[in-house]
Image (spheres, grey):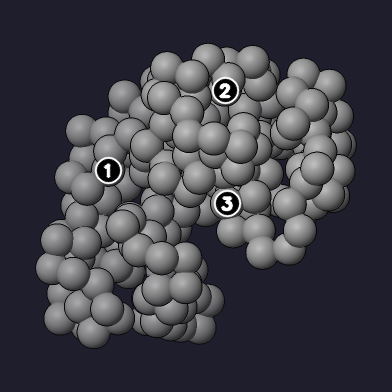
Amino acid sequence: MRPLTRDSLKKGAAALARKDPALGRWIRLIGPLDFRPRPGRFHSLCRAIISQQLSAAAARSIHGRFIRLFTPTRRPTPRRLLDIRPRRLKRCGLSEKKVLYLRELARAFEGGPLRRRRFANMENEKVIELLIPLPGIGRWTAEMFLIFCLGRPDIFSMGDLALRTGIQRVAGRKLSDEKVIERSRGWSPWRTVACLYLWKISHWEGEPAE
């Protein structure tokens, strides 16, 4: 399955602006997206686990300390993570549970169900089904992996609070779950592009789109 590219981001943004005029006003205000899928399947899932239930700033800080454990490359690998003592991982600011989750993830890549998996050829739901049995990985984490690592173009995460905030700003009112689902379906096959804009909208501090 083809990941998002600079050209497909532009194509998706134009399609969304036509489909949803209210979202289109925000798209024109924000402008083109600067997004590239992150390389490294294992590292991306580590980052998603680290980011769970944290602010963006806190997640960046802990992740920065985490990758410094993997000098000189700063690229985590399953084997190297398993060689690091749990107490050193905790000193990065990770909870005991997250340390456990990261080590279980490393084992899954090292010799378990994720060893030599070719995610690029798998359907979205198949990827989710493969990941969520692992400790600490729920649907939200799997969806973030699909977006930020695999660059899948048509993902929408109902469990993401910032996305809900962004939708409310676009709509100008609070929407029920049913209305959110209905509106997001209208953005297909570019729901990931909508998500990227909605995250920006949720934190927008300038004048709102009119």
Residue 79's x, y, as percent? Answer: 30, 63
Q: Residues within 10 Å of mark 1 (few under 14, many from 20)?
A: many
| Towards the viewer: 116 or 158 | 158
Compared to residue 83, the image places residue 113 above or below, namely above
Element class at badge 1: loop
Cα–Cα span, label 1 and label 3: 24 Å
Element class at badge 2: helix
Write the residue at 83% across / 49% down: 29
In the shown orientation, is residue 35 left or right of residue 39?
right
Compared to residue 152, the image places residue 19 above or below, namely above
Image quarter of the C terminus: top right
In the shown orientation, is residue 82 left or right of residue 183?
left
Compared to residue 7, the image places residue 33 above or below, namely below
Write the residue at 84% across / 21% down: 18
Residue 184's tag is 2
Residue 5's x, y, as percent? Answer: 77, 39
| Towards the viewer: 199 or 83 | 199
Compared to residue 97, the image places residue 173 above or below, namely above
Cα–Cα span, label 3 and label 2: 16 Å
Given the image, on which type of amino acid does mark 1 rest?
Answer: Ile
Residue assigned mark 3: 202
Image quarter of the N terminus: top right
| Towards the viewer: 137 or 32 | 32
